[in-house]
Image (cartoon, coloured by chain):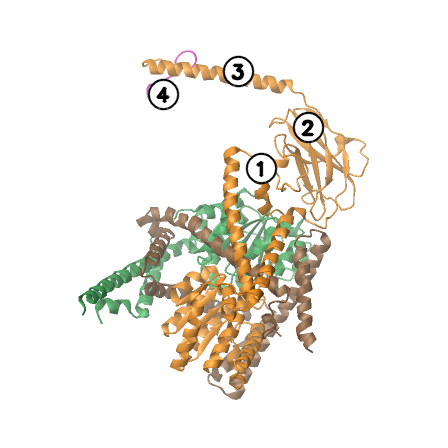
Chain colours: A green, B orange, C brown
Amino acid sequence: MTFAERMLKIDRRIIFLVIGFCTLLPLLYPVGLPIKISPEVRGVYDYIESLPEGSVFLLSLDFDPASKPELHPQAISLLRHAFRKNLRVIAMTLWVSGTGMADQVVTQVAREMGKESGKDYVFLGWSPGGTAVIINMGQDLYGAFPADYNGKPTKGLPVLQGIANLRDVSYAVSLGAGNPGVEAWYVFGKDKYKFELAGGCTGVMAPGLYPLLRSGQINGLIGGLRGAAEYEILIGQKGKAVAGMDAQSATHLAIIVLVIICNVFYLSLRKTTRQQAHSGT
Amino acid sequence: MRGKGLGVKGKGSAVVQGPVVSGVAGSFARFFFLAACVTGLSHSVVFAQTPLALPQDVRAFDTPSDGGGSLTVLWSPAPYDSAAARYQVLLSEGTTVPDPAAMKVVAEFPANQHYVRESKWPWWTRPTTGDQHQFTLRSGRGVELKDGTTYSITVAAVQNDDRKIATPVQATPQPNWMNWNQVNNLLLALLFGGIVFYAISTARKREIFLRRIPGLDAVDEAIGRATELGKPILYLTGAHDMSDPSTIAAAVILGRVAKRTAAYETDLLVPHRDPITMAVCQEITKQAYLEAGKPDLYKDDSNFFITSDQFSYTAAVDGIMLRKKPAANFFMGAYFAEALLLTETGASTGAIQIAGTDSDHQLPFFVTTCDYTLIGEELYAASAYLSREPVQVGTLRGQDIGKALILGVLGIGTLLATLGVMLDAQWPQLFLDLFKDVK
Amino acid sequence: MIFLRRQVPLLITLITGIVFAAQYYVPHPASEQMLTSVTKWLQIIGGFALVLGVSSLFHVHAIKIRRKEAGWGYSFVLYVSMLGTIAVGLWSNGKEAVDGTMTAFGWIYNFMMVPLQGTMFAILAFFIASAAYRSFRARSREAAVLLIAAVIVMMGRVPLGEYLLPISGDLSQWILNVLNASVRRAILIGVSLGTVALSIKIIFSMERSYLGGGKE
């Protein structure tokens, strides 16, 4: 086996080691390169900035612990921004396995920003049905969630005063890792009940949501860890997302170098094979 | 004008230094300054001379094609329509209005806004010409309009301290049974349904050509390879339940694959994430073995339930792949983040892999790790391609006709929209509105 | 019996399919109320499906343990874990934290479920690298175009890439907003037409595989 063939059939574990080092080292020794803000993330930020105090902001944390590294920083940044603008925050989730994590992040950020449950924000928790929950909320919020996650009746909560259903929501953001997620919130939510909607998602899902963004069905998109990092820069509070960008940079570069090396060997092997075929050996 | 050497000296905007160029420039500047003064004066003369008048032709009615709780008011444009003047929409409950001035102001906006042409009504439901003013009042945010209750509504024109209120008119909000704004949507849906039915009836009468889908031709090859190696076949039906079209398509293809595995007497493993899908696939597999004439070879536990949790299922299937080393892996249906975990593990065992999914976010992973990938609606087409049943083939044909229609509309629509902008014409909207989604 | 197993479900599918397709075009509150009632039923049935999932799991692994099939020890571990988590969850009333203090259920959630799920998802990063190394080869012109686009987007989406190749940021934005969006739209149109066609076939009983078995 030639060197090129050996390199093309390299043990996957060596590649795993390279990726492991590229992820670990920048986390231990951060560099802090500048991050450019994209128009799609700015769209979300600008809209929240434009909302007057007391507007109703709905944040649906539709992800499970698997997507925590990418979507958790997005949730933290959005909540910080919303609380800073003194918006009335309604948080919820359509994924049962993400309920505990969603409750933790909302409680943690609210405590940090000095906000009170029931008065400044409410965490509704999870209800079965996925898209059926969105439709029910669109008709009657209190019917879909008679009590919040802590068991307090939702009717009568100061934060929900004057809110009957989704039509009374000023802005909704769905942080989705799959289905139900951003698309479900558009089809069963915004399309019927006419509130403004934005999306946050994992890096893998982001390209699939660009048609919705380009057509104006969502007015902003926070895609993956990069989107979360951009949002942290915009609100002026750097966190795990910005810290993770160095690791992501190194990993991307490692993959690019590996792909280039692989192609160099592949093309050289192909050239050798062709030469051998021509010479008849 | 040059940047350097410009200066203002004396009266007007005189450029005092330099040659002829500066002199000509100065003349131009003086001309434009005088022109601006005259224009400004004439504007102020015009506005000063246009008295505020009562808004004309005010009429109100129940907003059509809605669920109630809304009224629409129309009135004619006026000479004083500008940013300097304002319109107010006034509302009160009941048919009698003792004092229009005491009515509640529910909206106020500059007089050069809110025209029918700016609204989202398509041409077949537009109530009047585009130059008319229009305002739609809805329940919510401080305004409550109860269905069946008559309200008096009017428009006031306001400029400085002057206010002219038109005679109030009455209207009653009512819910409607049909959203006429979406009748184009309904007709297009019915048209597509009709095309599908027509294509199915055509398929029953004659043979329809289907292009070769390489992934499906490889199904036989994959099953044959597994038989030669004496290894089982692994078939996955995806992450969604039976209400999803991709899972239904996966179940249909399973029937065809099961028939082949029965014929070749190859082991079939079908781990499931959803118990209902498992029950359906059990029936499908049993039926397939019956049709292949090998009912005794059917094993009930060839279809088995693992768990509905995404990564637990993935870990279990990866374990099956590494232990049982199937020769062929089929990934049909909807997939999420587990896609690459499954296919990369399968690739490491040397299995031939065929995927088919409508989850476009996972397509890059399937394409790079699988030998053949059915993209998007090729998965739905696969069912027709394998069975050659008239219903399946006819549906495929109907879909293709639908796609051809959409392509045609895209081309014609783009051309007309461009013409509309270039010629500043409204007539292209007659065609474009037919394909607009209006709520 | 055939009538109950076959004809009744098909009739229900036909009626509800047509009614709820028409419901989309009817804005009247009565229509919205009907939709709300049905979605409430969907939520109730969704709750039952959870129970169905868990009971299926119990049943399958109980058989494995009883017959002492290969790997039955893992089934035993699954059983113990499931019962233990259910017991702890019921004891903690389903709450991960009470007044800021973590419950036992919360401990299981935070220190077992979250890291395990995170680990599985994290494996993807390594698998992407090995898959890219194996398959991103310029075998043909199309493959070369794919390779170049992938490199540009990978560079443009990270700060280091934008620092080394400033144009990669704008190029990757253009690839995502123009090329990617248009291709995704095309796939979406095709898939949506397929979904509509399949739904029409199901409503009008031309597709019955969801009931199990072939045509009768």
Q: Is B114 situated above or below C2?
A: above
Farthest residue to the front: give it: B206
Q: Are marks 4 and 1 in contact (CB under 8 Å)?
A: no
Amino acid marked by disc 2 = Ala
Q: Is C27 situated above or below B163?
A: below
- The tag earlier along the polypeptide, 1 or 3, is 3
Label 1 belongs to which residue?
B427
Q: Are marks 3 and 2 in contact (CB under 8 Å)?
A: no
Farthest residue to the top: give it: B10
Element type where label 1 sits in the image: loop
Label 3 belongs to which residue?
B38
Magenta span contains residue B11: yes
Question: Residue A270, located in which quarter of the rendered image?
Answer: bottom left
Amino acid marked by disc 4 = Met
Q: Are marks 1 and 2 in contact (CB under 8 Å)?
A: no
* Same chain assignment for discs 1 and 2: yes
Measure the C-alpha gap from mark 3 to mark 2.
28 Å
Chain ID for label 1?
A: B
* Same chain assignment for discs 4 and 3: yes
Label 4 belongs to which residue?
B1
- The tag earlier along the polypeptide, 4 or 1, is 4
- The residue that appears at 42% across and 17% down in the rendered structure is B29
Where residue B167 sits: x, y (%)? 76, 30
Label 2 belongs to which residue?
B157
Question: Is any atom of residue B287 visible in this view?
Answer: yes
